[in-house]
Image: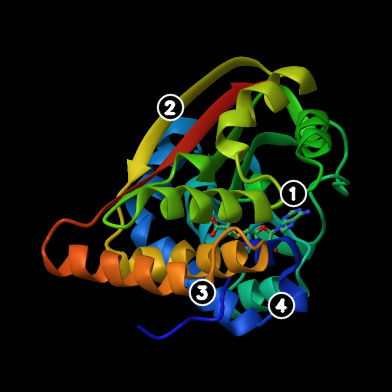
Amino acid sequence: MDRPLVRGGEFSDVDAHDTNALIAYLDLATDLSSHDKRESYRAQGIGPNMHVLDVGCGTGDDVRAMAALVGPGGSVAGIDPSSAMIEEARRRGVPSNARFEQGAAASLAFEDGAFDACRAERVFQHLHDPAAAACELYRVSKAGGSVLLIDQDWETLTIAGGRPDITRRVVHAYAERLASGSAGSEHRRWLRRAGFTSISTHAIAAMPNLTTAFSQFLNAGIDYALEAAAIETNDAHEWLLSLLQAEAAGEFTCAVTAFFSLARR
Ligand SMILES: C[S@@+](CC[C@H](N)C(=O)[O-])C[C@H]1O[C@@H](n2cnc3c(N)ncnc32)[C@H](O)[C@@H]1O
């Protein structure tokens, strides 16, 4: 297997890394989650004339999709701290009722109560101060407005096929190196303390095959575990070989839990 360059922790500071590789990573993730994305717009009730904010919009696919749903009487703003992501989002197309701006979740450049709906997908796991970001989402939401957070809890990653003790060390090293690697399990605490009510959370397990798991997080998990001296190089080789053998035998199993939390202001 080729070793892709992307490591999940790099999304906390996209512009300091290989931005083309991070954009390619996002495109694969978007392909894999297109059904869940459409469901999430429906669950949040995104519709005509709404004013919507997408925090950590990346390449802007959700902004463009939601711009079509809110129509000419609504608007969608996408913000992201990465100039490379904002440039790419603009290059892919800016609908007349949408805009892309550089900005960070913990200090949003919007008025109080500006939005009917706010969304942050796979963003809180990359934030160093997620509680402050939740407070900002509360501030910019209208009374009765909604917020949707989507994140994995990377400590929930299960992998069958390699030595279990190495698996747990790789999983823990990956979760530890993200700014907020257990974000999905912490949504409710951040949202409730920010003031949101009617918080409902549901969880879905994604089950990637070995190739996808390797390119999306296992390669990074191995690197992080090696860097943390949680495993040795020969452990990594032996573990990966076991996973390849398990995949070839049809025994490889991998699942990670993603949490979808919808709340009201
Ligand atoms: C995994 S990507 C998800 C992108 C998009 N939401 C999606 O679902 O495709 C995480 C995004 O969060 C952005 N991000 C990182 N730190 C941020 C911060 N402090 N505030 C807002 N966004 C941030 C990154 O630049 C990146 O575009």
| Mark 2 or mark 4, earlier in chain | 4
Q: Quadrant of ligand 1?
A: bottom right
Residue drawn at the location 44% of the way across and 63% of the way down: 29
Q: Element under label 2?
A: strand
Query: Looking at the picture, does residue 234 appear above or below residue 201?
Result: below
Q: Element under label 1?
A: loop
Horizontal side of residue 111 vs 186, given as left or right: right
Residue drawn at the location 30% of the way across and 72% of the way down: 241
- Dot 2, crowdedness within 10 Å: few (<14), some or many (≥20)? few
Along the line of sight, which residue is nearer the eye, 123 or 143?
A: 123
Identify the residue under disc 2: 202
Quarter of the view holding residue 232: bottom right
Horizontal side of residue 33 vs 121, given as left or right: left
Does the image show residue 19? yes
Number of the front mark, 3 or 4: 3
Identify the residue under disc 4: 84
- Dot 1 beta carbon under 8 Å from ligand 1: yes
